Image (tube, rainbow, N blue to C red):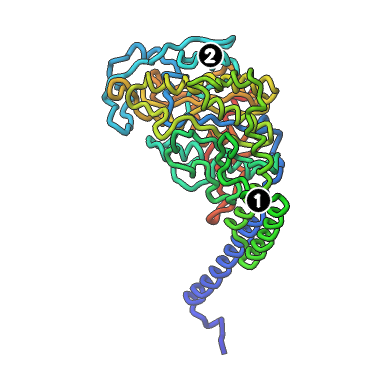
Amino acid sequence: MFDPTHLPRRQFLSDAGRGLGLVALSSLLADDAQRSAQASSEAPNRGLKAPHFEPRAKRILWLFMHGGPSQVDLLDPKSELIRLAGKPLPDSLGNVMTRRNVSKNPLLGPIRPFRKHGQSGLELSDFMPHLAEHADKLCVLRSCHGDSVNHPQSVYQMNTGSILMGRPSVGSWISYGLGTENSNLPAFVVLPDPGGGVKGGPPAWGSGYLPAAFQGTTMRPGKQPILHLLPQPGMTSERQLKVLDLVRTLNRDHAVARDSDDELQARIESYELAFRMQTAAPEAVDLTQESQSTQRLYGIGEKDTDEFGTRCLLARRMLERGVRFVQVYSGDTGGWDAHTGLASNHDQYCRKTDKPVAGLLTDLAQRGLLEDTLVIWGGEFGRMPMSEQGTGRDHNPWGYSVWFAGAQVKGGFAYGATDEVGLRAVENPVHVHDLHATILHLMGLDHEQLTFFHNGREDRLTDVAGKVVTDILA
């Protein structure tokens, strides 16, 4: 007969340890399965959800200047950069990591002069005369910084909080956290630049490990805002609805038999949303409903501004119809990436975007939407103060500018600072995690509470960092 009193101490502890370990592992696996099942059951839930606290903004419009606009030529005036132009970077600023070994190149002064605008006296570059008329609406964060000097990684970080591909984008987090106010349109819409793809591609607006139903939906103006949305000729609404009902029933039976499938649930949801959008989307993108004066405000019909202005106006129509998050990209595969010829590059892109962006701010304000809409303008990083090839600038993730408008943030206000030549953020630095925490806060979401159970932990947009920049709140 087994006598536990005669069991050697080492063997007892070893056997007990294995037993307790198995019990603990079983508990963890059960907990993980329960959380996964809960997450899967919530996957198709795109309906309206309550914020954590009273929000300052109900919606977001993110104007993404792809390629890296130069902060020292647009938003961050540096008198020392003018004085030191043509000279090497001061030794006091130390070594700096660059992609193309430009750290020893001479400093390049601002391409256009800066002037004070509005009652606030906020300084903005002559590159953007139309935006300057809205100086008192802008909150310029001059001390932003990230972690990579490369485009794809920085595009991912600005959009998802990580330099690695595959994490959920800001728009997906907000869609997941707050849902949609219009069941006939996506909660998260992306309007890419028709000139070419973003470096890093669609994962920049993907849902990552969140349910696939929360990924961004790309849209374009015209009769077919989403490709293959319209039914085939001869397919009536009644017949299509019957087909959809049958497919829904078969798919759900299939899902139940396989203990749920996120991708399948998202596909079912996308079919149902597409059916509803066949009526809603064409009306939403019909710009003929807009007055000529409104279209002129955005520069529609003008050679330089027609394309971007059209997408900005389309974005406003999405927002006022309940779309939660709209992202509009400026810049093709090269975009604002001025390694040489910065003057001509930024002149070209500012001509395309300056008037439409200013018109957008005017239009939102006139319609009473700006007060509870957060408008964001910025790229994946900025540019170096040193010259590259004599006329351009290399990538700079160490100190750059992003501006906010609306959502009850301080207008005519500059927050933080880079050093004397605009190289690094030195005063009130705002990391990308802080930027994201602030964006979520303005939407009434606590970045530490907005989580999703993934790989054994409660994951979030800001990872284990991020603080809200409360000093910019009005």
For residue 359, the mark is none
Q: Please identify the residue farthest to the bottom as the structure is shown.
A: 1
Q: Residues within 10 Å of mark 2 (few under 14, many from 20)?
A: many
User: Mark 1: which secondary structure?
Assistant: loop
Q: Give the number of the mark in front: 2 or 1.
A: 1
Q: Spatial distance from mark 2 to mark 1, Cα to Cα?
A: 59 Å
Q: Which residue matches tag 1?
A: 234
At 28% from the left and 24% from the top, the residue drawn is: 389
| Percent of width and height locating residue 160 | 51, 41
The answer, for residue 92, to whether it is visible in the render is: no
Q: Which residue matches tag 2?
A: 122
The answer to the question of whether label 2 and label 1 lie on touching residues, with beta carbons closer than 8 A, is no
| Percent of width and height locating residue 49 | 70, 43
Horizontally, residue 89 falls left or right of residue 416, namely left
Image quadrant holding the C terminus, namely top right
- Specify the amino acid type for callout 1: Gly
The first of marks 2 and 1 along the sequence is 2
At 50% from the left and 26% from the top, the residue drawn is: 402
Image quadrant holding the N terminus, namely bottom right
User: Mark 2: which secondary structure?
Assistant: strand
Q: How crowded is mark 1: few (under 14 residues within 10 Å), some or many (20 or more)?
A: few
